[in-house]
Amino acid sequence: AFEESSVLEVQEVMNHLERTKDAGQFVLMGLCSGADVGFNAARADDRVIGVVQLDAYAYRTVGYYLRHYGKKALELDVWKRFITTRLRHPLGNADSVEPTASDDEQLVVNPYAREFPPREEVAAGLKRLVNREVCLLNIFSGGQEAYNYGQQYVRSFADIDFRGRLEVDYLGEADHIFSGLAHQQFVLDRFVALM
């Protein structure tokens, strides 16, 4: 499975660097699924002393929902669609339409669907990393659909005492791949500051 093979591949690279460059400690950095790989490799290998995750696993909180739906509650178009739908289907039973063959042909399936593990599993991994005194830096973009405010990560893991080992930044105006030069510079500066 990718979750297992990707960790083994990271460990192979670390083994190579340990043999050829006398490197014994590592800081892993990744974006999206690369962030997931870095987190999983850090859990599996004590040589990892730092993890920088860009758009890491994110879990929705009350604050997330208030911000997400609060904005929509103020949009006139949202209310118009809601009222129109309720007038047409007062009991919420919209007529179902079976797709035709041409509909199926036009269906585009995303070849990669990122699935987050249960929050409890990630929390257990975070506790392990904190106990090993691993430095954690998470930077979230506005392109991460499951994340919409700066303190969301800390609040979603409120049961963990990070003991000053976690730093979180939220760049709401950044896209998912941090394509803006200012956002890229911010990520690099934060990475260097972690070291």
Image (spheres, rainbow, N blue to C red):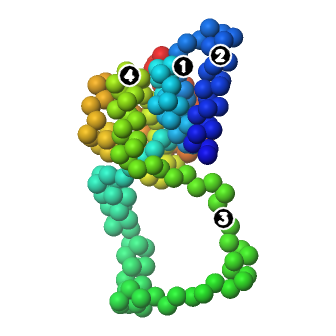
Tell me which amino acid carries mark 4.
Answer: Arg
Badge 1 element: strand
Q: Which mark is residue 111?
A: none
Tell me which amino acid carries mark 3.
Answer: Val
Residue sitting nearer the eye, 174 or 65 = 65
The span from disc 1 to disc 4 (Cα, nearest Å) is 13 Å
Badge 2 element: helix
Badge 4 element: loop
Residue sitting nearer the eye, 160 or 145 = 160
* Residue that appears at 60% across and 87% down: 98
Dot 4 corresponds to which residue?
132
Q: Which mark is residue 26?
A: 1
Q: Is residue 189 visible?
A: no
The span from disc 3 to disc 2 (Cα, nearest Å) is 39 Å
Circle 3/circle 1 CB separation < 8 Å: no
The span from disc 1 to disc 2 (Cα, nearest Å) is 10 Å
- The percent coordinates of residue 9 (x first, y second) are 65, 31
Circle 1/circle 2 CB separation < 8 Å: yes
- The percent coordinates of residue 163 (x first, y second) are 28, 25
Q: Which mark is residue 17?
A: 2
Question: In the image, which is nearer the foreground, mark 3 or mark 1?
Answer: 1
- The percent coordinates of residue 6 (x first, y second) are 62, 37
- The percent coordinates of residue 121 (x first, y second) are 39, 44
Q: Which mark is residue 109?
A: 3
Tell me which amino acid carries mark 2.
Answer: Leu
Q: Is residue 14 above or below residue 160?
A: above
Q: Residues within 10 Å of mark 1 (few under 14, many from 20)?
A: some
Question: In the image, which is nearer the foreground, mark 1 or mark 4?
Answer: 4
Circle 3/circle 2 CB separation < 8 Å: no
